[in-house]
Amino acid sequence: MEQNFQMTDNIRIAVQHAHEMLLHKAFEPAVQQGYEILKRYPNEANGLFIIASAYRGLGQLDKAKGILQKLVNKTDNFALAHQELAFTLAEQKQIKPAIAALTSAVNIESNLPLSWKLLSELLQSLGENKQAEKAYNNYLRFSAKYPKFGNALQAFIENKLAVSEGFCREHLKQHPTDVNAIRLLAEIAIKLGIFEDAEHLLVRCLELAPDYQLARLNYAHVLNKREKSQQALAEIEKLEQKENVPPQQILKAAILVRLGKFDVALELYNKLIKILPEHAGLFTSRGHVLKTIGKQEAAISSYRQAIECSPSHGEAYWSLANLKTFRFEQMDIEQMQQVLLSKHLSPLERVNICFALGKAFEDKGDFRQSFSCYQQGNALKQKIERYDADETTHLIDRTIATCIPEMFSNINNEGCKKPDPIFIVGLPRSGSTLLEQILASHSMVDGTKELPNITAMVRRLSERKKRDDVSKYPEVIATLSPEQLECLGQEYINNTQIHRSDAPYFIDKMPNNFAHIGLIKRILPNAKIIDARRNPMSACFSGYKQLFSSGQAFSYGLENIGRYYLDYIKLMDHWQKVLPGQIHTVCYEDVVKDFETQVRSLLDFCDLPFEENCLEFYKNARAVNTASSEQVRQPIYQSGLNAWTKFDPYLDPLKNVLSPMIT
């Protein structure tokens, strides 16, 4: 026992001496010391580690890699050996193997700041921005000097946002200029969708640390989310002056898309794909651009390339299904079913594939299997969204109680008088894109997209920072002064200008704006409002089958979407009473059955002269980025009417809710 103890002690001293050599960059003596250790103790892992580290220091990377690969294969829990192997591989530009080695290192021992830092850098070089930020937050966590900030990072990584915010704010009381903590607060705000707060925090962060590249990238992202896309682009250009890593270019492409610069964005995506040919998300994003500009075959090819890169990339499968005119082959269906069997599939990927399979089986006429897939996808998405139907009903009731006839008695003398906007409202999948395409085919009307400006204005007026905060909206509508009304109306006109061309009128097709018609008519009394309406069962089931890119949380449950439809009708009936003659209702079924009459009526309401182009809307080559993009590039067809009846046996929960409407 004594001899063994003495031998262990000797190893410890020898190893410590060798580490001091490495620390002082005495690499050749360190190699010799390592071999001396192995002569006495042939199975000593530290000897191999020292030799490999010294070889890396001498630039002999192949020798270092060979030794380290043997070392990690023969030892189960030597985290530093995996880390050293990763450093060696990174120097050899073997990025993916280095990431794998770093992942092994931090799985064995999480408290390795240098591993987390390099992992963040390597992931960023591959354009994996979310994973890179997660790794960077772990680097900050394990290198944190202050316990409260470390606790804040730990809670953030575990998605305990309220706990993280609490620790972060406590830390900032004592260290108000800690830019890492300020950026973390901004990240929390981004996750909660409170982009205005995130913007202010990141402005402060960059005032303190102008060269904080990650914070500036976060800032550009937030600006883009807040429809300040030109400003976001300027921030990307500042980043490019320092370095030009893929996450910046990926965000730049997304900004260009939001600005409607599709050709430039497409060119950038093509360049990025050459650099990162295995990045499935780039192929999907490129496919979205191609779909928007009407290049369907090229979009299909790009989505399929995404699947080749990553067979579990659910967004690509749903993107194919979301073309509406695309039909999956049997091999596609079998591949999706196989992917669903994986226990490692993320909830969101699973949701995407369930919706895609629902569409695939629907096209095959297997409506039982189709509904089963839609039902599974909706149930999973509902858990993610946590929608509260009672909350919506309460908001509608408050709106009706607030927006009484007296509020609108003087609207012609208030607000911004410009007649430019034409709002198309209603439920999604109710024909709003068709109406937009008809109007956008008129020479005096610019088509834009679903603009978030009114929603952003409502969020600001609500002064609501957290989900549990009491909103000041809609009651605040009644308190706005004439000056505020005019200012808000002009703000809307100014902020939407970026999406327009030279036509005197433009379309805002955000369907959810039906809830804000009271605000719209007070700030823009001459705006036109069009209510795109559809048979209740058709509208609701079409929404239930649709996986939306964002929002529309009400649609992921038959009872929820039915209740939402009833609330929508109740509020639209109220608007018709308090704003008589101000809203033009267009029923999708009427448009399909008597097209020209409905088009002429629509143009008359908008004070637009009749133009033949509006009847040939499907020839309009404008970009369309909604789910109906391919459908509105075809002439009117009746095959979509009452498509819900094929699923009738499964829709009793919806029919029960809608019984007041459908009887």
Image: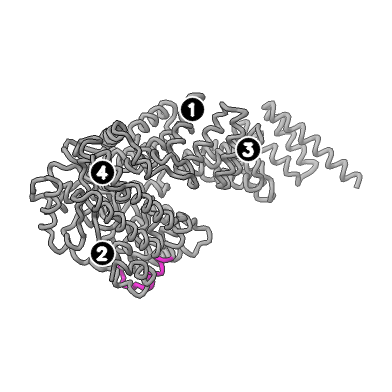
Residue linked to disc 4: 408
**Residue lying farthest to the front in this orientation:** 406
Could you tell me if the residues under marks 2 and 4 are in contact, i.e. CB atoms within 8 Å? no
94 is within the stretch colored magenta: no
- Marks 1/4: CA distance? 41 Å
Q: Amino acid at mark 1?
A: Arg
Spatial CA distance of label 3 from label 2 is 54 Å
Residue at which label 3 appears: 150
Kindly report which numbered mark, 1 or 3, lies closer to the viewer in this rendering: 1
- Labels 2 and 1: the sequence-earlier one: 1
Front disc: 3 or 2: 2
> Which residue is label 2 attached to?
535
Label 2, label 4: how far apart the Cα atoms are: 30 Å
Secondary structure type for disc 4: helix
Number of residue marks? 4
Q: Residue at x 18, y 47 (%)?
A: 621
Residue 162 left/right relative to 455: right
Task: Give the magenta part as a residue range.
Answer: 363-375
Determine if residue 390 is in view.
yes
- Give the x, y percent position of residue 149: 62, 36
Residue wearing tag 1: 204
Front position in the image: 390 or 317: 390
Q: Is residue 370 magenta?
A: yes
